[in-house]
Amino acid sequence: MCVLTPRTRPMDQPEPLTTTFWRAVQQGRSRAVRALAEEHPHLVHWFNVDRTALMEATSRGHNSVVEDLIALGADVDAHTPRDWTALHLGAFVGAVMPIRILLDAGADARRTNDDGHTPLIVAVRAGQEKVVQTLIQRGVDVHEADGWGSPLHHAIAKRQRAIAQRLINAGADRDARDALHRTARDRARDVGWSFDYDQHMTL
């Protein structure tokens, strides 16, 4: 006798709609995603455990799927239980084009996750220089700090030298103080860096 468990289903039983939709999102099959979402609009806003299809498509770099989901009404500022938005996820993995698409659609680049990190700080800490460059070009505030310090403090703490230089070139304040009242100059000395008179970093 065959006993079905929660992990098995008869061969003639169709795959759940949400599974079909999620697989299409993960694989970047924009035509399938669009067709399913147009027929079943709730899928655009559906959370698969802790993230939406837009978050998943962003984190996988599927540009056309991101565009289609936004066009179909996806919330660009929807967030996980830990307050990560699609922008945060894209910043973490270095998904530059999806980030541009999200920003064009009005995604909030100042929103913080439950660590107090903006997408810029997430990108800085993850070493995603191209994302940092993109956010700076889009006018994100390079001075906006979390409870610990500024994006420049984070770049130095993570020894992200090229990113730190980009932040400085964008006007980041080297004398701003972190939660321990230490400036970026102080933090730089801690890791063996220094700033010359021209605002460039030297070892």
Image (tube, rainbow, N blue to C red):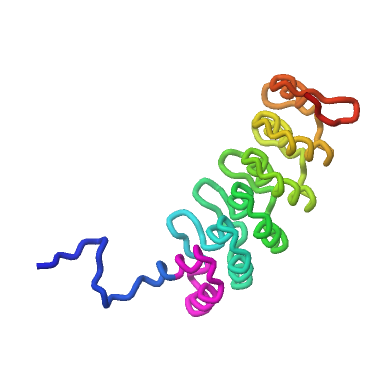
How many numbered discs? Answer: 0
* Residue 159 rendering spot, x and y as whole percentages: 67, 30
Horizontal arrangement in the rendering, residue 39 relative to residue 159 (left or right): left
Main secondary structure along the magenta-highlighted residues? helix
Horizontal arrangement in the rendering, residue 200 relative to residue 192 (left or right): right
- In front here: 87 or 131? 131
Which quadrant: the C terminus?
top right
* Residue 137 rendering spot, x and y as whole percentages: 80, 51
**Quadrant of res 129:** top right
Residue 140 to residue 151: above or below: below
- Asked if the magenta segment contains residue 32, the reply would be yes
**Quadrant of res 145:** top right
* Residue placed furthest toward the front: 203
Q: Which residues are magenta?
A: 21-44
* Residue 6 rendering spot, x and y as whole percentages: 25, 61
* Residue placed furthest toward the left: 1
Residue 165 to residue 51: above or below: above
Residue 40 to residue 169: above or below: below
- Asked if the magenta segment contains residue 50, the reply would be no
- In front here: 88 or 131? 131
Residue drawn 59% across the image and 73% down it? 72
Residue drawn 61% across the image and 57% down it? 77
* Residue 88 rendering spot, x and y as whole percentages: 61, 49
Residue drawn 63% across the image and 54% down it? 95
Which quadrant: the N terminus?
bottom left
- In front here: 75 or 64? 64
